[in-house]
Amino acid sequence: TLQFICNATDDAQLTNMTFYWDYDGSWLANGTASVGGLSNQTTFQRTGLNDRSISWNCLACDDASQCSFAAANATLRIAIPPGWSDPQKNETSVYWNSAPRFNASWTDDTNLSGYIFSMNQTGSWVNSSYMPFGGIANTSESTSIITANAGSVVAWYFWSNDTSGNANQTEMQNFTVQ
């Protein structure tokens, strides 16, 4: 949820405040609130917004039928990173020299771009090559040979980005080599 806050001060009684924005390429009124007093702050909330730049402004009117926009339009950039869920490996018990498959599910409001798998078997993180994938829902997958000795704790996670340049990563997962 984004909150757009409009402020107005006037020498006559304010009557309403209208929120205008350019969300899809044209300026439109997107809500009006009845207000009162010589000074007012009104908040307009919007949800379900996608990655993009938004320009916006507020028009305040008073009881003398005088209306005025804010002196300048405001612009903001909405950046929503890919969402992840269900990171897992396909083996309950992992042994030295085995090759478990790791995966995580991803969603995005625009379009996924790719992912990197990262694993720490020896105290240092090692990244896989960047793997392209697309769509608004997809699964990252990687198979790795386990070289850590029995009793070692191995950590791993996936990182992903979208075509808008937003990035996210799963929480770090771990297991003990059997």
Image (tube, grey):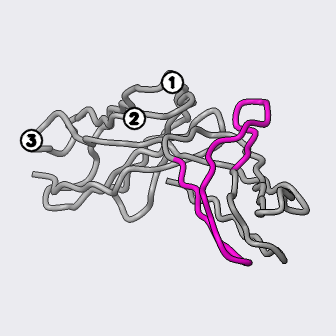
Q: Which residue is pictured at 68% across the width and 58% down the height?
A: 16
Mark whose residue sits in front, 3 or 2: 2
The answer to which quarter of the image holds residue 111 is top right
Mark whose residue sits in front, 2 or 1: 2
Q: Disc 1 designates what residue?
A: 133
Q: Secondary structure at mark 2?
A: strand
The answer to which quarter of the image holds residue 15 is bottom right
Lower sequence index among marks 3 and 2:
3
Asked if residue 84 lies in the magenta stretch, the reply is no
Name the side, left or right, on which 103 lies relative to 130.
Answer: left
The reply to whether the C-beta atoms of the residues labelled 2 and 1 are less than 8 Å apart is: yes
Q: In whole angstroms, how far apart are the C-alphas of marks 3 and 2?
A: 22 Å
Asked if residue 36 lies in the magenta stretch, the reply is yes
Q: Which mark is residue 160?
A: none
Q: Disc 2 designates what residue?
A: 106
Extreme residue toward the right, this view: 71
Name the side, left or right, on which 82 lies relative to 143.
Answer: right
Q: Disc 3 designates what residue?
A: 92
Q: In whole angstroms, how far apart are the C-alphas of marks 1 and 3?
A: 27 Å
Q: What range is drawn magenta here?
A: 19-46
Lower sequence index among marks 2 and 1:
2
Dot 2 alpha-carbon crowd within 10 angstroms: few under 14, some 14 to 19, many 20 or more: many
Q: Position of residue 27 (x, y in %)?
A: 79, 36
Q: Secondary structure at mark 3?
A: loop
- Give, as a three-letter code, the residue at label 1: Phe
Q: In whole angstroms, how far apart are the C-alphas of marks 2 and 1?
A: 10 Å
The dominant secondary structure in magenta is: strand
Q: Secondary structure at mark 1?
A: loop
- Give, as a three-letter code, the residue at label 2: Trp
Q: Position of residue 146 (x, y in %)?
A: 26, 44
